[in-house]
Structure formats: C-alpha cells, structure tokens
Image (tube, grey):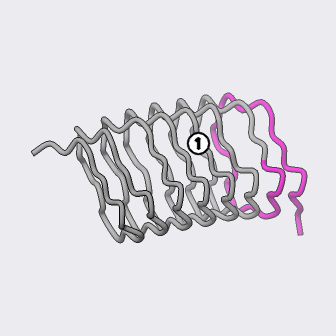
Amino acid sequence: MEIRSVNLPEVENVEDFFLYSNNSLQSLELPRLKKVGDCFLNFNNSLQSLKLTQLEMVENSFLKYNNSLQSLEFLNLKSVGICFCHFNKSLKFLELPRLERVGDFFLRYNNSLQSLGLSQLEKVGDCFLQYNNSLRSLDLPRLKKVGGCFLYKNNSLKSLNLIKLRTD
C-alpha cells in the first residue's frame, strides 16, 4: 500500500515514530498539531513542503532524510529538543519566527538550505548548525546563550549577526 496523503484534522499530539519511510507520501495535514515526540517524519522522499501552523513543541528527531522536502514553516514553534532537522538534501527555506530555544544537533546536513528565519531564538545547545553548505547569512538578533560547537562546516556562511550574545 502506498500512502500519498494523510489528513488528521483533530490530532493535537503525536508520540513516537509517526510517519517513517513512506516514499509516496506527498501531502500531510495536521492543522491542530501542537506537540511532537520522537521520530516524527523520517524517510518520506516525496513530501515537498510542510506547514504546521499550531505546532509549539518538538522533542527529538523531528525531520530526517526527507529528500524532496523544500520548504518548512512553523509559525508557533517555541521549543525544540535534540536532532530537529537533518539530511533533508532539497530543503531551501525554514521559517521559525517564534522559536526561543533549541537543544543539541539542531540543523545538520541540509546542503540546499538558503534561508533560515530565527528572529526570536535566545538559547541553543551543542552543535547548533553543521554542514549546511548553502546558507550564506545568519541573523540571530536575540541569541544570548550557546552551547559548544555552535557553527561547524557551514562553508558558504559569510554574514553572522549575534548582537545580544554574551560570554559570562
């Protein structure tokens, strides 16, 4: 059976291993989703965009190996645990306008990522950005605290704005 579309209009919370390895999935609608546990959307190679307007919290391993995914928009996401978005080779745009804090291994190996919106981010854990080789600028105007290995091998990064970052 090939799943091409998933529409769950009443679901507010998803626990572990939600959609894993559905290569024909093209459409996902979860308009009331607020919280996600572990391994939410991994290895779904036909999904091109995802918009979860009510999502507020993500625990671990949110998006991995979704090779056609190009655009992500999470307007109400405030908190992310570890391993948020990795190995999504076509991802170009990621908009997280209310995100305030992230854990370890936030964005890794998203080699097409060109735009990253994190205007409210204040705190990040270890290994924040790694191997996002198309990202040219990063504006984090409210960032105050970072963990170790903050930026690693983002080879096209030319501009960095961290006006609130302090060392204690």
For residue 147, side relative to residue 56 (left or right): right
How many labels were placed on the picture? 1
- Image spot of residue 112 (x, y percent): 53, 30
Q: Is residue 48 above or below residue 3?
A: above
Camera-side residue of 118 and 83: 118
Camera-side residue of 85 and 129: 85
Query: Residue 87 sits in which quadrant?
Result: top left
- Image spot of residue 98 (x, y percent): 68, 58
- Image spot of residue 163 (x, y percent): 90, 51
**Position of the C terminus by quadrant:** bottom right
Residue at point 62%, 31% (across, down): 114
Camera-side residue of 98 and 154: 98
Judged by its main secondary structure, the magenta piece is loop
For the record, the magenta segment spans 140-168
Q: Please, what secondary structure does the residue beneath circle 1 have?
A: strand
Label 1: how many Cα within 10 Å (few below 14, some 14–19, many 20+)? some
